[in-house]
Image (cartoon, rainbow, N blue to C red):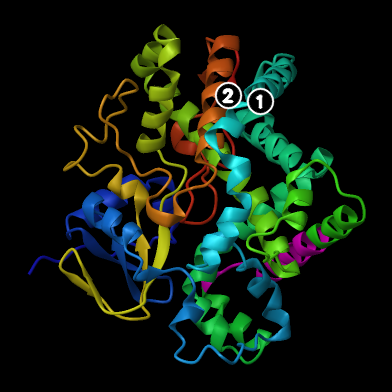
Amino acid sequence: MTTHPAINIFSPHFRTDPYGSFASLREQGPVARVTLPDGRSAKVVVGYDAVVAVLKDDRFIKDYTNLAEDKSTPRRVPAGLRQFAVLSNNMLRKDPPDHTRLRSLVSKAFTPRRIEQLAPRIQQIADDLLNEMAKKGEVDLIDAYAFPLPIIVISELLGIPVEDRDKFRHWSNLLVGSLGELLVEEQQMIKATSAIGFLRRFAPWRMDRLRLLNAVNAFIRYVRRLIATRRANPQNDLVSALIQAEAEGDKLSEDELISMIILLLAAGHETTVNLIGNGTLALLRNPEQLAQVKANPDAIKTVIEELLRYNNPVNMVTRIASEDITVGGETITRGERIFVAIAAANHDPAHFANPEDLDVLRAENRHLGFGQGIHFCLGAPLARLEGQIALSALLRRFPDLQLAIDPDALEWRTGFLLHGLDALPVRLT
């Protein structure tokens, strides 16, 4: 029997080089095992076909409470953990019919046609940021460009003051960086009789739990005040539209509103930040491919698709089996949470020729960067457009862009679900 090395997806090594880990996991088969920090093992789906099968199978669910035999009695959440329950009231964390209702309330704002109308404004934002960057010889591309561009766009869509963006960045960083740990411990959270007891159990994850709780509370308070302001004085923005929206007579509840706005704000910029940062790094580390991009400016859509495949902003998502299900020869038992490695599927040699090579003009590219099935990323058209405009404008303005740091010294953000840089120092000329 072949023995495979234990891979801890919470480790700094995995954050730095997830693709090396995915290659090792793929040797186990389409469904592999990884190690959690407390010694438990968990299953991770790494094969392309298996990932697609899971994402399209409605027997794999998002909401752990849907496993309850008796749903007539609402679950009681300890007072100190209610903020986490509030955060779960959005389309990303729900199954049909709740997911269908919630998604329908925001989908009209993210159609390809509506998003295309934002192109002139996105271009203006990019140009303004590049003008500021031009005053310096060296910048952190994440701080100066990759972060502010999408946060300005989503803030304007929602009607949130852009000057508060540093608050959102702080809250979002803590929340997103902790999301994987929270999902792993969700069942214990639901069963918890006290917040103190749960947080003590949470200790093995080595998180700064108090900072996380404070960030979540501050985020919720901010959004609650915003909702109250928009109720009293509606504007031409998405928050006001959500407050007024009705789907077959069913409005969003207060908790659903809060959770949806936080989701849109966080997800509305996190993916694009990583796309711009990871994509720029990939090109700077592959100068022959960077030359191809410069020589073929009209191929930017193809380029962005390859960057999404090659160094995807999202490593993996999670699902819960609602019954015993066999995937890739492995049985996933009812109630078991599995990790679905989108980034691993995008490097599966059974589906992509030379998957470890960056090929910016790759013709066949059915990557899974935005997922599959009913939870396919609603913001995909926006992220694609932002990526296309941002990268084109950056290389046009600074054709001699270079890394200002040894690539091996780069720091990657905490967390294993998303994959993005803390900072990307670059020289502009």
Left or right of 181? Residue 137 is: right
Residue 11 versus residue 387: which sits nearer the camera? 387
Callout 1, which amino acid? Ile
Question: Where, quadrant-wise, is the N terminus in this rendering?
Answer: bottom left
Q: Is residue 391 above or below residue 83?
A: above
Q: At which x and y percent is residue 194?
A: 66, 89
Whole-percent x, y for residue 171 in the image: 71, 55
Q: Is residue 341 left or right of residue 389?
A: left
Label of residue 130 in the image:
none
Relative side of 76 to 299, left or right: right
Query: Magenta segment, principal secondary structure?
Result: helix
Q: Residue at x 43, y 28 (%)?
A: 304
Q: Is residue 285 visible?
A: no
Badge 1 density bin: few <14, some 14–19, many ≥20, Cα 10 Å: many
The stretch in magenta equals 205-222
Splitting the image into 4 quarters, where does residue 89 fall?
bottom right
Residue, disc 2: 390
